[in-house]
């Protein structure tokens, strides 16, 4: 690692000011991506601003939504009884992220701010039609994700919470890399206030995306058979040592059918 200053703000506004005072400052949430990046010397921040201790964790349930604090860990999400009952696909997703140690440190807000193209949470946010709440505004899911490692967040903006409307149905299926447990292809399906949505992660070069052809088929007939004949083009999909673009295109169909059947 390179030398850096470590700051522990007393409030969100203090954290925002620290970011504004130094353009090379970076936020630390759970650190499950950030710390390895520092160890590999792929990033050289002058200041690290720690978001722990700012009261940004916690889960609250209302009749029409569940709100998850930005610093809430994967373990807290997977074990929350309200999420297990009302958004079971989200609880299942959190239980499949990393390993026990990662689930006790990694956070939803950190994952969404990073927007890794193989991350799981973006699919749940996009499929359910969640709202990302920051210290400055509210960002609809459809406007938030803007490409690989790119979001609508401004440089000095902090994710404080995520609001999920309650879907009628939800499920997540994930074809995991056996080593990293990242999604080679992950599919979240939801039927709820935002309509019928299918969101895909791990497959496309630009990150999470909606599969509109499958959404339209499921709107007519919510069943795995309704999407059996839909072919996903391999153009624009990832091809690497783990899987070719054509294989990922095949996996999208397989995992989506599993997700629908499970929902």
Image (spheres, grey):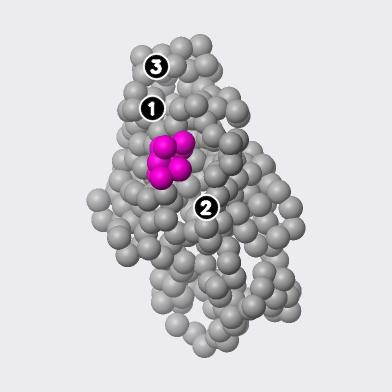
How far across and how far down the image is residue 172, in percent?
Answer: 39, 36
The residue at which mark 2 appears reads as 59
Looking at the image, which is closer to me, 60 or 250?
60
The residue at which mark 3 appears reads as 223
- Could you say which quadrant of the image residue 246 lies in? top left
Magenta portion: prevailing SS class: helix
| SS for callout 2 | strand
How far across and how far down the image is residue 83, in percent?
Answer: 45, 43
| SS for callout 3 | loop
| 48 sits to left or right of 77 | right
- Could you say which quadrant of the image residue 46 lies in? bottom right
> Magenta includes 89?
yes
Q: In the image, which residues are magenta?
A: 81-91
Alpha carbon distance from label 3 to label 2: 32 Å
Q: Residue at x 60, y 28 (%)?
A: 193
Judge the density around disc 3: few (<14), some (14-19), many (≥20) Cα neighbours within 10 Å.
some
Where 50 sits versus 129, above or below?
Answer: below
Where 165 sits versus 145, above or below?
Answer: above
Q: Which mark is residue 263?
A: 1
Residue at far top of view:
220
């Amino acid at each position: 690692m390179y030398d850096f200053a470590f700051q522990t703000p007393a409030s969100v506004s203090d954290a925002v000011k620290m970011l504004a005072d130094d353009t090379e400052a970076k936020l630390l949430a759970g650190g499950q991506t950030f710390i390895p990046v520092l160890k590999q010397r792929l990033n050289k921040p002058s200041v690290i601003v720690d978001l722990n201790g700012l009261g940004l964790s916690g889960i609250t349930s209302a009749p029409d939504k569940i709100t998850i604090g930005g610093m809430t860990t994967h373990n807290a999400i997977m074990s929350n009884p309200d999420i297990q009952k009302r958004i079971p696909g989200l609880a299942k997703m959190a239980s499949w992220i990393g390993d026990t140690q990662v689930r006790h440190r990694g956070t939803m807000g950190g994952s969404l701010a990073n927007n890794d193209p193989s991350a799981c949470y973006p699919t749940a946010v996009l499929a359910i039609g969640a709202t990302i709440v920051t210290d400055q505004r509210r960002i609809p899911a459809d406007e938030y994700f803007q490409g690989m490692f790119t979001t609508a967040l401004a440089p000095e903006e902090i994710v404080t919470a995520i609001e999920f409307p309650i879907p009628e149905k939800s499920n997540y299926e994930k074809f995991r890399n056996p080593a990293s447990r990242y999604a080679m292809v992950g599919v979240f399906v939801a039927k709820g206030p935002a309509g019928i949505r299918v969101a895909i992660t791990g497959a496309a070069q630009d990150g999470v995306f909606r599969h509109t052809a499958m959404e339209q088929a499921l709107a007519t007939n919510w069943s795995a058979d309704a999407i059996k004949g839909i072919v996903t083009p391999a153009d624009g999909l990832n091809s690497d040592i783990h899987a070719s673009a054509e294989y990922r295109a095949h996996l999208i169909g397989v995992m989506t059918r599993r997700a629908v059947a499970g929902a």
